[in-house]
Amino acid sequence: MVFSLSAAEPAKKPNILFIPIDDLNHWVGFLGRNNQTKTPNIDRLAKMGVAFSQAYCTAPSCNPSRASLMSGLRPSTTGCYENSQNWRPGISEDKLLNSHLAKHGYLTFGAGKLYHGAGDRGGHFDDYFPGKGGALKLHPSAKDDGVGGIKFAPLAVTDEDMPDHAVVSWCVEKMTRKHDKPWFISAGLVKPHMPWNVPKKWFDLFPLEQIQLPPHIEGDLGDVPSAGVKIARPSGDHAAMLKSGRWKEAVQAYLATIAYCDYEVGRLIEAWEKSPEKDNTIICLWSDHGWS
């Protein structure tokens, strides 16, 4: 993404609806990589504009990937490579995208997860909603909360109870209000980040007996150097998943969580379509690094 703003540009600057999504991989309909997925809203958005089918993140983790995208700087420049790091020592906050836009006459609003970490607002925002927490009750049909580090289960709650729902509602309110300046609204959606816990109705869209496993090769690490095998941790979460016999359940849960995420994207699109600024708004949807 390149945003170039200067005093020489026309007075009517476009509004920007920014939709960062956490851990969404290429299991979206328009990319054709998984025929089970249900993402009608993201697919519709892709048809309305430009879809990048070969977009790559600069780092395979949330924190460095997000810091890089929001600053335009590579991890090799910022020094931020891991989720546990503070990205600030390597990035001047006035250089961040939202700060840059604020400096050039934009109202900047943020909600949910934009930078890494809950409520990490990063840079300049005129108003920011970190979201709401709270425990969400598992559905009686849930066996447990998952397998090892892979957490998933249906919930006995409504869509309105989900933290992402509150984030979208806040952004919709900002979008539909009349402003005297162009606006940048970032609606940071956490799902489909783990735990893959969403209301049970989303699980019901994907009957377990119809779930197909992703393409995989037995012994895939056979030609990988020992250092790479160590990083891949073949005896870790995936080994536990295979031993449990619940791989299809995990795939079902990820698909369900993606479908829920698509629903929230649909709410944003619907609000944009009703907005008085519809014809002067850029929508940019992206995912930080996907899920293997």
Image (cartoon, helix red, strand yellow):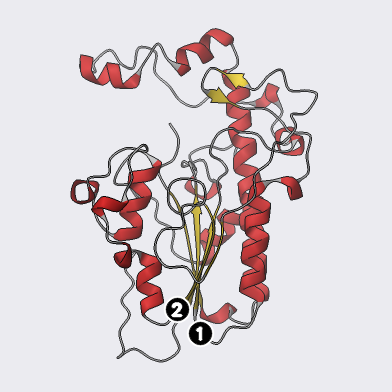
Badge 1 or badge 2: first in the primary sequence: 2
Q: Secondary structure at mark 1?
A: loop
Would residue 104 be found to the left or right of residue 167 on screen? Answer: left
Find residue 30 and report its horizontal and vertical position in percent.
52, 50
Q: Secondary structure at mark 2?
A: loop
The residue that mark 1 highlights is 181
Closer to the camera in the image, 147 or 98: 98
Q: Residue at x 42, y 47 (%)?
A: 288
Q: Amino acid at mark 1?
A: Lys
- Within-10-Å neighbours for mark 1: few <14, some 14–19, many 20+: some
Q: Residue at x 48, y 39 (%)?
A: 33
The answer to whether residue 80 is above or below residue 70 is: above
Quadrant in which residue 290 is drawn:
top left
Q: Is residue 195 visible?
A: yes
- Within-10-Å neighbours for mark 2: few <14, some 14–19, many 20+: many
Find residue 187 and report its horizontal and vertical position in percent.
55, 59
Q: Residue at x 62, y 56 (%)?
A: 167
Q: Amino acid at mark 2?
A: Tyr
Closer to the camera in the image, 236 or 255: 236
Q: Is residue 212 visible?
A: no
Say if mark 1 contacts mark 2, CB within 8 Å: yes
The residue that mark 2 highlights is 106
What whole-number distance in Å separates the C-alpha atoms at marks 1 and 2?
6 Å
Instruction: In the displayed orientation, state which residue is furthest to the top.
Output: 243
Find residue 215 and report its horizontal and vertical position in percent.
46, 25
